[in-house]
């Protein structure tokens, strides 16, 4: 028997995916060089966060005519709203677990504060810009491309690993920070991957919101201590607990839908 050839989308995803990853890392390196001469304090806005968006833009420009069949279609507004509510609930749980973990560790909480002379209200805006810059690439380009070849879960995990490795500075901080940070990015990627469905715009909007709220939580609790071993461990615990809770909820809902569909089919068979 002749082996079945892979579907066109499964074959076509590779070139734009590799292009995106390469373009993102190169663009991010360029942003690191621009940062010192930009006059922008990296604690206010790290220009490297724009790297994934630049990578996505370059990938779109190169593969414009071939990307359309590889990118996802829209989901109903009702589903977007439902997932938005769940995402906000997940962020509240993340914040709660993070605070409790830090208190158990004996870490002081930073609270609302200015950074590099920039008022907190403006920091919220720059953090939103940074989160959007990343999510345009990670959940707007990389994950949808990977979903042409892999399941949603696997695509989310791979995206989380690339997202974590992209933070190359963690590899100078020791094993606790490296492992803790990668666990956090993978867990959050799985969470955002399951919340953010539909078109690129639908995915990016929801993922940006979650990413932003997570970063604001770290700002309010840890400030510039977020990359310390204790801060990284607390972040990882909060991310893992939150993702585990909501993945269990998704699994339970899926089982319930499966049972309902089975009952409906049996009812139709009896009626026939």
Image (cartoon, rainbow, N blue to C red):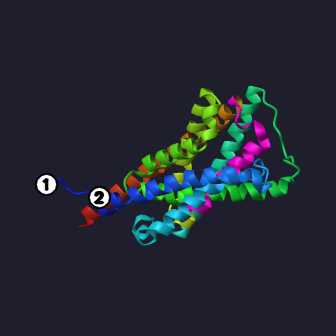
> Does residue 125 belong to the magenta stretch?
no
Q: Which mark is residue 266?
A: 2
| Secondary structure mostly taken by the magenta-highlighted segment of the chain | helix
User: What is the spatial separation of the Cα atoms under label 1 and label 2, in whole angstroms?
Assistant: 37 Å
Q: Nearer the viewer, mark 1 or mark 2?
A: 1
Q: Residue furthest left?
A: 1
In the shown orientation, is residue 201 left or right of residue 37? left
The magenta stretch is 203-229
Pinpoint residue 73: horizontal percent, then vertical percent: 45, 68
- Residue that lies at the very extreme toward the bottom in this rendered image: 65
Which mark, residue 101? none
Q: Taking the image as drawn, is residue 88 in sight?
A: no
Find residue 118 and report its horizontal and vertical position in percent: 86, 53
Left or right of 15: which side holds 46?
A: right
Q: Decide whether residue 211 is among the magenta residues.
A: yes
How crowded pointer 2 is (Cα within 10 Å; few <14, some 14-19, many 20+) is rated as few
> Tag 2, which secondary structure?
helix
Residue denoted by label 1? 2
Sequence-earlier tag: 1 or 2: 1
The crowding category of the residue bearing disc 1, from other C-alpha atoms within 10 Å (few below 14, some 14 to 19, many at least 20), is: few
Within the image, what quadrant is residue 66 found in?
Answer: bottom left
**Residue 17 to residue 186: above or below:** below
Task: Work out whether 197 lies above or below 183.
Answer: below
């Amino acid at each position: 028997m002749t082996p079945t050839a892979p579907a066109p989308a499964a074959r076509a995803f590779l070139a734009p995916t590799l292009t995106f990853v390469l373009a993102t890392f190169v663009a991010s390196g360029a942003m690191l060089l621009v940062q010192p001469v930009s006059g922008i304090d990296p604690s206010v806005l790290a220009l490297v966060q724009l790297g994934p968006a630049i990578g996505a833009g370059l990938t779109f420009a190169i593969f414009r005519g071939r990307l359309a069949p590889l990118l996802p279609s829209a989901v109903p507004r009702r589903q977007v709203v439902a997932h938005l509510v769940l995402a906000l609930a997940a962020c509240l749980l993340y914040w709660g677990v993070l605070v409790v973990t830090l208190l158990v560790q004996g870490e002081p909480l930073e609270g609302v504060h200015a950074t590099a002379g920039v008022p907190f209200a403006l920091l919220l805006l720059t953090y939103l810009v940074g989160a959007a810059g990343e999510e345009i690439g990670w959940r707007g380009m990389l994950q949808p491309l990977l979903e042409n070849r892999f399941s949603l879960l696997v695509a989310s995990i791979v995206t989380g690993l690339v997202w974590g490795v992209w933070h190359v500075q963690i590899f100078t901080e020791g094993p606790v920070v490296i492992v803790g940070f990668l666990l956090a990015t993978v867990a959050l990627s799985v969470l955002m991957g399951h919340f953010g469905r539909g078109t690129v715009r639908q995915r990016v909007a929801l993922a940006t919101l979650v990413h932003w709220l997570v970063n604001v939580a770290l700002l309010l609790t840890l400030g510039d201590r977020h990359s310390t071993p204790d801060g990284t461990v607390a972040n990882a615990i909060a991310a893992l607990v939150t993702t585990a809770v909501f993945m269990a909820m998704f699994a339970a809902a899926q089982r319930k839908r499966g049972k309902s569909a089975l009952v409906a089919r049996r009812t139709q068979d009896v009626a026939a």
